[in-house]
Image (tube, rainbow, N blue to C red):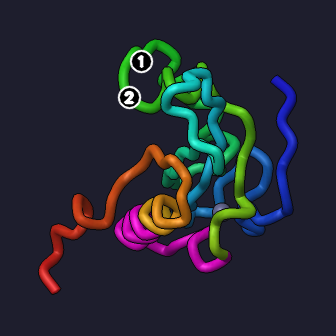
Amino acid sequence: MVMKMEEGKECGDCKEGEPCGKYHVYVLELNQDDEKTRNEKGYLYVGMTGKTIWQRLEDNWTKYGNRTSGAPPLIRRSFMRFRMDLVPPSAVSSLTREEAERREAVLADDLREEGFRVKGPRVRENSRIAM
Ligand SMILES: [Zn+2]
């Protein structure tokens, strides 16, 4: 698998194969095979991880390689490339998992609003904490 990073906006504190200890929001672009559901802007997957985003991507083939439902099989089948150019600098790394999960859901909703087809959480599902 040959992968190229768009703009260098992945976490600057992570080293290759060595996560920095913070939580990262990432965006992948997926292939759209089905013409009927095809979205002109693109099909995105928004996720969150305490690993480096590359380790997490690899997990879909290794750690989660046997999963037949959920995101791993979708990503194995349809991964095109990272779209870190769509991740706001403030969401690239967070100190806590909760913060990263909130930013993940906000970004997924923002991208839906921009017209992308998005696989990922929604803010409403995520807002268990009363305001
Ligand atoms: Zn990092």
Residue 105 got which mark? Answer: none
Asked whether the residues under the numbered discs 1 and 2 touch, taking CB atoms below 8 Å apart as contact, a structural biologist would say yes
Of 32 and 77, the residue lying toward us: 32
Of 39 and 11, the residue lying toward us: 39
Three-letter residue code for mark 2 = Gly
Residue at disc 1, secondary structure: loop
Residue on which disc 1 sits? 67
Where's the N terminus, which quadrant? top right
Residue 17, image x, y percentages:
73, 44
Figure check: 109 above or below 116? below
Three-letter residue code for mark 1 = Arg
Picture residue at 57% right of the left edge, 46% below the top: 44
For the record, the magenta segment spans 89-106
Residue on which disc 2 sits? 70
Residue 63, image x, y percentages:
51, 24
Q: Is residue 67 left or right of residue 2?
A: left
Of 88 and 25, the residue lying toward us: 88
